[in-house]
Image (cartoon, grey):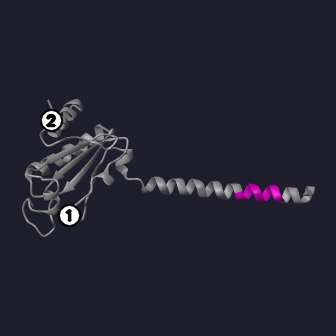
Amino acid sequence: MIDNGNFKHYLKAMIRSFTARRSWLVLAACLSLALIPAAVWAGAVVAANGGHGGEVLDLKPLLTVGKTNLIDFYSPFCPPCLQLAPIMEKLAERRPDLAIHKVNINRAEVTGIDWRSPLAQQYKIRQVPYFMIFSPEGKLVAQGRAAVEQVGIWLREAGMMK
């Protein structure tokens, strides 16, 4: 049994402990939110393979659960890809339900569009830009021409194309 004097001491210690834990919980929550990619919270285009261009890549871990995912395969040597980049940024801003991932097919040492990169071979990419669309559940729903048509629909819906 705790007497009255010890009870007050015990209660103060519990309050200090709870306050300290609550501070740590708030800090942990803030830190964990900071670690979540910005694309999850706001419309942004994410470089999916930055620094590892052209290498074999598993797309499944890139996909944002709960959002429609657009994979945009590109080459930094492709003029249409470079023109499309700011348009994709605006689309991402206007469509927060989309997660847009840019995937560079070029290996660092290759100048020009790298059609022979392991990544281009893996996904049989014969043209860039090349799109793949995944449902919020992670199922591939369109690629190639069908995906281009869907991107066109999204651009028209966003008021970015007639």
User: For the residue carrying disc 2, how many other residues have a C-alpha within 10 Å: few (<14), some (14-19), or many (20+)?
Assistant: few
Spot occupied by residue 100 in the image (x, y as percentages of width and height): 27, 46
Residue 116, quarter of the rendered image: bottom left
Q: CA distance from mark 1 to mark 2?
A: 27 Å
Towards the viewer: 160 or 113:
113
**Is 108 situated above or below 120?**
below
Horizontal side of 36 relative to 6 (left or right) equals: left
Question: Which mark, residue 100?
Answer: none
Q: Which residue is mark 1?
A: 55
Task: Look at the image and tell me in which quarter the N terminus lies.
Answer: bottom right
* Mark 2 element type: helix
Q: Quadrant of residue 139?
A: top left
Is residue 112 rendered magenta in the image? no
* Residues rendered magenta in the picture: 10-17
SS at badge 1: loop
Residue at 71% across, 59% down: 17
Q: Amino acid at mark 2?
A: Glu
Residue 6 place in picture, x, y as percent: 88, 60
User: What secondary structure do most residues of the magenta stretch adopt?
Assistant: helix
Name the residue type under label 1: Glu
Residue drawn at x 16%, y 33% is: 161
Residue 11 part of the magenta segment: yes
Query: Could you say which disc has been placed on residue 149 in the image?
Result: 2
Give residue 73's position: percent from left, percent from top: 17, 52
Residue sitting at x 8%, y 50%: 127
The disc, 1 or 2, on the residue closer to the chain's N-terminal end is 1
Figure quadrant of the C terminus: top left
Residue at 32% over, 49% down: 63
| Pick the front one: 114 or 17 | 114
Residue 156, given in percent of the width and then of the height, sits at 19, 31
Question: Is 3 left or right of 96, judged from the image as shown?
Answer: right
Q: Residues within 10 Å of mark 1 (few under 14, many from 20)?
A: some
